[in-house]
Image (cartoon, coloured by chain):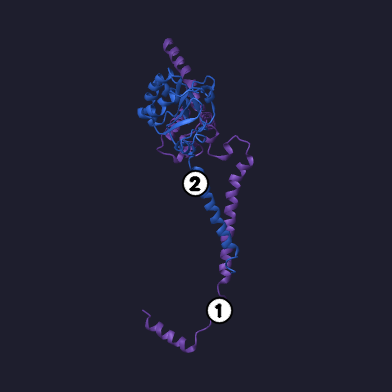
Chain colours: A purple, B blue
């Protein structure tokens, strides 16, 4: 009985660190990463490169890193070590000193969208201003009578 | 006339022109550099772009200049590239022949995972020198469009032949053997 107890304690001592490690393992997935990194040969984000052999190799590499408990940032660092800074798809991720360029990548499209919306609003306002205003002139009494007669005739 | 100078049509026109310019720029950037082929077609040999890269084994660096005076069969490959698997045994065979004649195959593994590339070298028993271009920096200076690509460089460091795609016996006999007889 004492031996059995010792055996159980030994098994628990071995199992606990493994369970703790699994709990500490950062949670990330291939889907979480592949939109933020490039397939360098395809020239597209990895998420859009489905059948390219290099994309498949890159995915397999990322999955190996995830399986070995690497966090998202660690996976990205490993990819940079393999393929260089160009593998990062998000401008801010690249460690270069082109801070202005990184900001402009986000600011220019935002300004373009605001300008486009402003242009559409302006065009709508101008179009509305061009429409004839005021009440429509009333029909002549003879025409109004004929119109009423027609309406009654076609009234179903 | 008033319609022509109205701000909205002008803005739309500018946007269209800007988009067309962007499209033209993108297409021009995407065009591969074919200077080497043009030079070869007119009977000239262009100097090969100089480079220095780490060895795939991780031990030190090597440059193209280290091989000056030799005929170099510079082969760009990657472990994920299917045609590279077909041509590797042929390149290894030719490397054994070339070694005796002051010539070499020089492999450049590009855009590849290092461990996979080392596994490839071991699987195919490749003994020729291997360099590593992880970020594919040499693709632009060599005007590369895919893998594998092979550049035959004469003893003076000039590109004497190009194969965009896997090499075969015929290419090696026609393009490499004549260079072996040339002296610096």
Q: Residues within 10 Å of mark 2 (few under 14, many from 20)?
A: few
Please tell me if label 1 and label 2 are on a single chain: no
Left or right of B149? Residue A112 is right
Using a 10 Å C-alpha cutoff, classify the residue at mark 1 as few (fewer than 14 neighbours), some (14 to 19) or many (20 or more).
few
Residue most extreme to the bottom: A142
**Residue B136's disc number:** none
Judge from the rendering whether residue A21 lies leftward or rightward of residue A153; answer left or right: right
Q: Can residue A121 be seen from the camera position used here?
A: no
Towards the viewer: A44 or B172: B172
Q: Which residue is mark 2?
A: B27
Chain name for mark 2: B
Q: Quadrant of residue B4?
A: bottom right
Residue B76 vs residue B38, the one in the foreground:
B38
Residue at (39% x, 22% y) in the render = B94
Chain bearing tag 1 is A
Q: Which mark is residue A135?
A: 1
Residue B109 percent across, percent down from the top left: 47, 27
x and y percentages locating residue B21 in the rendered image: 54, 51
Q: Secondary structure at mark 1?
A: loop
Tell me residue B129's x, y (percent).
47, 21
Q: Check disc 2 and report its element: helix, strand or loop.
A: helix
Q: Is residue A96 visible?
A: yes
Instruction: Please state which of the two labelled residues, at mark 1 or mark 2, is closer to the viewer.
Output: 2
């Amino acid at each position: 009985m004492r031996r059995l107890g010792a055996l159980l304690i030994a098994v628990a001592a071995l199992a606990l660190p493994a369970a703790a490690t699994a709990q500490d393992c950062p949670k990330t997935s291939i889907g979480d990463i592949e939109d933020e990194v490039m397939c360098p040969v395809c020239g597209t984000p990895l998420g859009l490169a489905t059948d390219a052999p290099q994309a498949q190799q890159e995915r397999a590499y990322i999955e190996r890193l995830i399986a070995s408990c690497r966090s998202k940032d660690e996976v990205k660092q490993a990819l940079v070590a393999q393929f260089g800074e160009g593998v990062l798809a998000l401008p801010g991720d690249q460690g270069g000193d082109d801070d202005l360029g990184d900001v402009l990548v986000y600011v220019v499209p935002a300004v373009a969208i605001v300008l486009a919306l402003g242009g559409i609003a302006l065009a709508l306002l101008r179009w509305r201003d061009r429409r004839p205003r005021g009440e429509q002139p009333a029909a002549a009494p003879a025409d109004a009578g004929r119109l009423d007669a027609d309406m009654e005739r076609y009234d179903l | 006339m008033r319609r022509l100078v109205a701000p909205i049509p002008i803005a739309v026109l500018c946007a269209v022109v800007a988009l067309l310019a962007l499209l033209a720029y993108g297409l021009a950037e995407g065009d591969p550099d074919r200077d080497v082929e043009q030079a070869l077609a007119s009977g000239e040999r262009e100097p090969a772009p100089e480079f220095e890269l780490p060895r795939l084994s991780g031990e030190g660096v090597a440059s193209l200049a280290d091989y000056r005076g030799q005929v170099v069969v510079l082969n760009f490959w990657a472990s994920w590239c299917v045609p590279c698997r077909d041509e590797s045994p042929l390149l290894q065979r030719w490397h054994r022949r070339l070694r005796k004649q002051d010539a070499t195959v020089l492999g450049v593994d590009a855009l590849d995972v290092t461990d996979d590339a080392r596994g490839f070298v071991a699987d195919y028993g490749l003994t020729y020198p291997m360099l590593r271009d992880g970020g594919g920096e040499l693709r632009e200076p060599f005007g590369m469009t895919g893998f594998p690509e092979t550049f035959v460089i004469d003893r003076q460091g000039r590109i004497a032949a190009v194969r965009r795609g896997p090499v075969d016996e015929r290419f090696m006999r026609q393009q490499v053997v004549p260079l072996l007889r040339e002296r610096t």
